[in-house]
Structure formats: structure tokens, C-alpha cells
Amino acid sequence: MGKTPSDLLPGTLELLILRTLESGEAHGYTIMERVWNASGEMFRVEEGALYPALHRLELKGWLKASWGTSEANRRAKFYKLTAAGRKNLEKEKERWRALVAGMGRVLEGV
Amino acid sequence: MRDLLRRWFRIPASSADIAEEFESHLAHKRRALEAEGLPPDEAERRARLALGNRSAWIEETRGAGGFPAIESVFRDLRYAARLLNKERVFSLIVVVSLALGIGANTAIFSLLNALLFRPLPVPAPEQLARLYFTNLPKGTRSWVNGREVQPTEMGHFNYAFYEALRRKPELTAGVFGHAGLGTMAMEHDGVPSQIVANFVTGTYLPVLGAAPLAGRLLNPEDDQPGQAAIVISERLWERVFQRRPGIVGAQVTVERVPFTIAGVMPRSFHGVQPGIGIEAWIPYAAMERMFPDFAWRSNRSIANLRLFVRTRPGAALEAHSRRVLEESVDPASNAEGREGYLAMRLHAQPIPTGLSSVTENYSGALWTLFGAVAAVLLISASNVTSLMAARAMRRARELAVRRALGASGWRIGRQLLLESLLLGAGGGALGFAVAQGIGDGVRAGLFGGERMFALDVSTDWRVALYISTMLVAVVLIAGLAPSWLAARTSIQTRGVTPAGLRLRSALIVGQTAIAFALLGGAALMAASVQALFQEPTGYDSARTLLLTPDLYNAGVERPAHRRAYENILRAVRASGRFESSGLLTTVPLIGALGMSSVEVPGKMDLPPRERMMIRQTVSDGYFSAMGIGLLAGSDFQPLGGPTAVCVISENAARLLFGGVQQAIGQKLRFNGPDWLEVAGVAANTKFQSGRGDPPPAIYLSVWHRPIRPSLTLAVRYTSDQATALREASAIFDAEAGRRVRVEHRTLSGNFLADVRVDRLLAATLSGLGLFALLIVITGIVGIIGYMVEQRRREIGVRLAVGAAPADIRALFTRYGLRLLLLGTAVGGALCFSLHRMIESYLYRVEVGDPRIWAALAACLMVAGFLAALIPAWRASRISPAESLRAD
């Protein structure tokens, strides 16, 4: 069983979503699957956490949502990175790398 | 765009949107599970399980990152609206009382704004100043409302002064002026109409910097003899010419003198005179064509120009005025007059908002009204506060429970503030709606139906600012007071009794004080109006009509007027339709006045001031037509009799000759050469207005001197007014040979117009005072009722152990009376500090008349006692057993 991002550090879920959308727009279910697959079936995003996060990011202006038709030929809401979202993704990535590096140093005890 | 707005206001996606997304996700998940090989119903079950409860999901998603405050504010607002709707009577009282306060304030403020606050719609109005003299020569006299006042300044100039000032551009950036304003007869294509016209100097329009709507302005070249340009207003263009194109260049006659329309001024322009709807501007020089009897421009004894300047920064106009005075002094005046003229000091007073007879005569009354309506708004606001506090007290338990359950003080306060916001918005909207009606009523009351007045009361930013400031203040005060009370609520105290009761009691004291002041003003004004109506004017003229025919504009040349009036008088008498008839020059009680210093042999030691008397010119029959008794001697002889005689009033006879009988046969004269013999003594009458004592008066024969341009015919009729008017008009028409325009008046009508402002003040103050009293009474009923409720148990116990019901009643009525007494005392202090606002309107009533104030205080006490008695009675009827069981 994978971990849900809430077990991880705060802000991780949003970073995962933004990263997932870097390769193109997607609807909620696809995002879930992409995270699952991309993390080597390690992170499982719960629906109950995914959608509030998507809406939060939309209100922040990092994502733009629009209704379209999915690969399953159903109506679905597609989310797309905005310019602001792209910029923040870069910032978040930097932050994450710094965090990982810092954690690494602590754990290695160098 | 919508996205942007949504993001800006952080409004979460709609529930429907989220629900659809939920369904979409569900479908995708089901499809994926089915693809893994699960049967459809199992896939469905697992998918639903993963997503959980749909509505909880929607709520959670919506809550994400949104701005919860707005959401909950809407919820609070809905709650407030529902609550107010539940207590409809309460809401209605509050909204109506607020609407009255706000409507009345908006109306009066709009009038004041139009008259006093709004700068003239011309470029750089702050540079405009009016000129006036101080240090006036001794012996300058002035009358206001029939009372002589000592003048300290004079704002009239001769034309030479204007010209001299114009020749000195280093002193001002422009000088302009206007003279007589009046209703004149205009004719265009044979169609007559009456217009309000103003004579102006050629510099008037250009220096003001107004822009014409069509054509051009009048300029100094038009202000020359022989020129015939006139500029009309957009209002006249519309009223008489129906906005006909090509109006510029059209020919009209004004008072039978031909003019060419040179331009049209836009509606917004009203010259320097706010409140007056001028329809035509005529060059000053044209007065010489229209009224050729006087050399209007060259005769320096004629001072009928009001002058204004555009100030030049750094120019010491006042200091250099002596040169201008020297160039305009009347060469015909004697040494003393010359010295007095040169000694006058010139002043320039900035008037960015203009100046007119309307601002001079009515702004005092408007300020008084403004004070009154502001007081009423204060009462309305305190009433709302009190009612809100009362509700907070009734809801004390609910609020205490909500607090105990964890609602923050802020949350509860916000709830109450929102309720008062809703009430304020309702009151404001309704108030704004009734303001128009109130304003129209006040305007009608102030100005009567006179066409000359035109006030632009349109709402501008000043009015908007005033209204919104009022509303915000009311909402905040009314909302915060109960919030403050609510915040002090706790489960233990179970209520807000002491603080709330103190607040409401204080409000009632304040309301009583205001009601007392308003009713005091109303009582004084009512007594004053009553005194005005009761005091005899000296005329007995219930069946007398005063008819002023415009013979000149009906084609009768001025030299032929004497003959025409003779014929008219003969025809009126020959018709046999009138009991009596006579001619007069100055119509009484309309503010007009003719005065001269009289010479009496052997009385020349009296200073000229004391020999100054009213001069009225009449024909025989005047006294009987006006119902003035003759005390001695006789009336003038009918046409053809001797004219070197006069009739004098009783007080003139006593003043000049020591008695009524002694006056007969004596001689006197005005500044003419002929001595006049006193033929009769008439009873005293008032002249200029219904106020003041009848002044001493001398009546001359209308036939003695060249007659004035227009005379008035007084007829005492036996039929009715309409018939009398028709029959007399027929005689005028026959004499002129065409239709004559007739102005008709009655003395009682003149009198009513004279006391218009007094009656308006008396009526509005009474209305507002009664409204205030009503609020005080309901306030007392409310607060005592609340006290009774609170002490139900205690009263029950007292009654059970033998207290008399009367004692219980006294317990509560005493409290009500104490509040009123305190309020009356505060009101008395208030009146003392405000008495100047009304003093100048009072006639034969002392502002401190103890009878009026004592009666008023007694009335208030009785009203308060009765108000307190209603709940007190209920208290004394409490059944002990029930009250003890109730809790």
C-alpha cells in the first residue's frame, strides 16, 4: 500500500500535482493515476485530498480549469498549469531540493 | 473574465460544478476498476466507497482555500433578513422612522446645497466677490419686514462707479453687475408671455466666463444706447419657442421695446443669483429705451446696480477705492452728501456660491429647518439604537447561550451590526424616495407658487456624501450599542439588564430633550403666527379685490394712462356692479414701500428722521374700498375736484398736529413745491408688511402729480371674486381696445404670502416635534414594559404580601416621570443655547415666555405619565400565583 501525501511533508501534494501537470493538462482521475505511476506506485492520492487541493491551486491562480471531453469520452474538468503555476512549480522544486539536501546532510551526519 | 472575478473575490466553484466533477471522477474510477476485471456493480460500490459522501465531499472541496468570511457574512445576512422579517412591526417602525429622518435631512440639505454650498457653474468661482460699502453716511435708512433696522452696509452702486472701476483694470480682473430683476411682458410673433428678466452690464456674461449654448454672449458693446441685443435662457427657449432651431436672430419685444436674440445660455447657468430662474439678460443701457423717464446711466443719484468683481491677486482694491468714489460722486449732491459718499469704505467679499435675494431671505429659515431635521434624525437614530438594544435585551438569553457555545463576541456583534445595516439600508432607500416629496413641499411652503424661484436641487457629491455619512453613523451607532451590550452578556447574569436599562434610559432622556426643544420652537412659532393673524392690519377688505392692469403692454401709451385710468374708474362706478372702488399706487402688505420726509410749518425742528412718513397715492373711494375708516374730515373729492389736499393717518395727525381734529385744515408738503391741505384723517393701517405698528402715513391724490406707470384698482364687490375679476377685466379690455393682462391680489392673500415662512416653520416644527414626542412615548412604554417583565416575580411577591396595586403603579410611573423631568431639564438648557435660531422669526412673543414653557413642560409630563401608566397598569394586575409559577 502506498503512502498518502498527507503522511509526507506539508506542501508535497501540491508539488506533486503541479509536477504532474507540467507535461500537459489533465483531469482529476488522470492526475491521480499519473502520481501513482510516476512515484513507482508509492504515493496514493486520495480523492478527498486531491480535489480540495486542485480547487485551492485554482483559486491561487496557479491552475486554470476548463470542461472538456476525456479519453473515456466523458465530460471532465481539465486542469492546466498557468504561467504563475509554472513559476511556482520551479520555486517549489528548488525548495524541495534544498529540503532534501538538508535532510540528507542531517541524516548522513556529515 | 468570470474566472478572474472569481479568483479576485476568492469565490469557490459552485456546488453544481463540483458535483459534476464528482460524477465525472466516479465514472472514470468505475471504468478503471471494470477494466481491472471487477463486475460493474462491485466497481460501482468500490468507486463510491473511495469517494465517500457526495455532499460532504462538495462542502470540503468548496471550503478549500476559499474566503470563509464572505461565505459566512452572506449566511449572517440571510439570518438577519429572516429575523427582521419575523419581527415585521419592529422593522417597520425602525425603517419608517429612519426614512423620515433621512428623507427630511436629504431634502433640506439639498435645498441648502443648491442655495449655499454649490459653487457657481462658471470657471474659477473662487475669484468672484461682491462689492459693498460700509461707513455709510448718517441718515441712511433701511427697513426689514416692516421694522426699521440700522444698516451697516450697502450693496448698491451707480453706473458711474461701475464705469470708473472698469477703467482701472489694475484693481480687478473684471467687474460686472446687475440691476432690477423682474417679471416683464415679452411678445414674439404676436404671442405675449411673461418672462423673468435681469438687467446686466455688458461685462456680466463675459467676466463670469459662461459659455453660450447657441449664439453669443452679451458684451460691453451691447451695453450702449441704440443696441438691441438680448440673451435668453434655455428654459425660455423651451417654454416659449419650443426649442425651435434658428432662434438666434429672432425678433422679440420686451415691454414693447424691440430686441434681437443674440444667444441662448444653458440651463445650468443662472448668473450669480442661485434660486432665481432668470430667463433673459438685457443690457443695462436698454433701460433707457424701456423706461425713458430716467437717465439710468448718467444720473449719479440712481444707485441700482449690484456689483461683483473677479479679484486680481495682489491688487489692493479696497485701499484704492477712493479714486473710484471720486470719479462717481454725484455732482448734484450738496457738500454733506459729497463728504458722506467719499467717506464710504469699499469691501470685496468672496462669493463663490453666488448671492441672490433668495439666499438672503430664505437661508436663515432653511438653517433653522436644517437644525430641526438634524434633531429629528438624531431622535430617529437613537430610536433605532434603543429598539436594537431592546431586542438585544429580549434576546439576552439566546445571545448568552450562543456565547457559551463558543460564538465569539465579534461574531455576535457582526450579526447585530448586519441587522442594523439592513435596517439602515431600508431606511436610507425609503428616505431617499420620500426626500423628493419633502423637498417639493418645503419649496412650495417657502417660495409659494412664484415663478421667479427656480432651484436646482439635483443630487451631487455633496448631497451623496452627507447622506452616506448620516447612514454610516446611524448604522454604526445603532448596531454597535447592542453589540456592546451583547458582549457583556454571560450565562450567569442571564441578561443585560443594568447596562441595557441605563442605555435606554439615557436615550429617552436625550429624546425628551430634543422633543422639548422642537415642541418649544413649534409653540413659539405658533404663538407668533397667531399674534400675526390676530393683530389688525387696519383694513376691512374681505370682499376687496386689487387689480393691476398692464395697460402699457396692451398698447396704451404712457402719456395716455391718466386718461385711461379716469375712464376706467368712471366705467367701474357706472357699471353699478361694485359697492366702492378707488385707485392706489403701492399695494399694501407685499413688501413695497414709499417714504418721504414731510415738511410742516412750525415743525421743522423735528429731525428729518422723525418726519419720515409712508407716502401712499390714492384716488377718492380708496378708503371705503379698502375698509379704512375716516376719523375726521372727508375723503378726496371725486374726479375734477381740488387735488392739493391730503388725507393723513391717525398716528401722523397725533405726531404732527397733536390730535385728530386739530389736523383738519392744516398744511404740509413733501419735497414738492405745493402745500397740501389736510382734508381728512384715516384710521391707522399697516403698509409694507403685517408686522410692526402701523407707521404714520400721508395719502396724496393720485390726480395731483403725473401718475405713476402703473396703478392698481381696488374694488369692493358684492358678487363673488371670479365675477368681480371678469367684470373689471371687461372694463380694462374695453378701455385698451384689446385684451389686458391683469394681476389680481387680495389683501388676505398678500398677508398669507407675507407670513409664509412663519407658517412653514410653525407647521414643520410642530410636525417634527409631535413625531419626536411619539418616539418618546413609545420609548417610555417600551422601557417600563420591559422593567415590569423583568420584575414580574418580585411584583407578584409584593402583591401577595399585601402591596396595594396603586403602589405598584406608582413605582413605575415615578420612573417614567423621572426620565421625562431629566429630559425636560436637558431640553431647557438646549433651548437656552439655541434660542437665537428662532428669535428673529418671533412676532410679539418673547422667546422666554414662561407661560409657553410651563404649559409645554406640563403637557410633556402628562403625556409621559400616561405612557408609563400603560405598562404600570399591567404590573398592578399581575396575579401573584401566576407570576410565581411562570419561571
Image (cartoon, coloured by chain):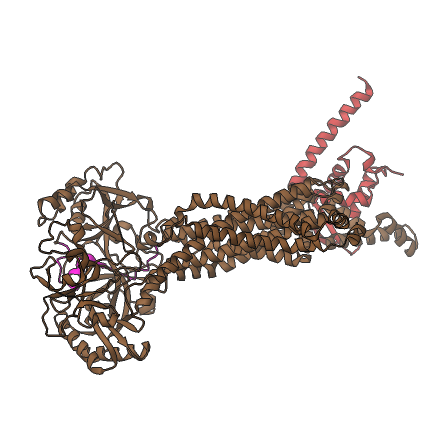
User: Which residue is at 47% across, 57% downward?
Assistant: B766
Between B188 and B795, the residue placed more toward the observer is B795
Q: Position of residue A25 (x, y in %)?
A: 72, 46
Residue B428 in view of the camera:
no
Residue under the point 32% across and 71% down? B542
Residue B72 visible in the displayed image: yes
Q: In terms of image quadrants, where is residue B414?
A: top right
Q: Against B464, is B615 above or below?
A: below
In front of the other: B298 or B362: B362
Indicate yes or no whether the magenta region holds residue B280. Answer: yes
Picture mark count: 0
Q: Which residue extends farthest left? A: B673
In the visual, does B644 lie left or right of B772?
Answer: left
Find residue B173 and report its image quarter.
top left
**Image coordinates for residue B442, horizontal then vertical, percent:** 42, 59
In the image, the segment drawn in magenta is B274-297
Letter of the red chain: A
As drawn, the chain in brown is B
Query: In the image, residue B2 lies at what x, y percent?
Result: 63, 51
Residue lying farthest to the top in this orientation: A110
Tell me the quarter of the picture where residue A93 sits. Answer: top right
Relative to B385, residue B290 above or below: below
**Residue drawn at (14%, 52%), measured in percent from left and top?**
B301
Q: Position of residue B471 (x, y in %)?
A: 54, 49
Is B548 left or right of B760, judged from the image as shown? left
Magenta residue check for B242: no
Give A106 or B666, whichever is nearer the viewer: B666
Q: Is residue B712 left or right of residue B418?
A: left
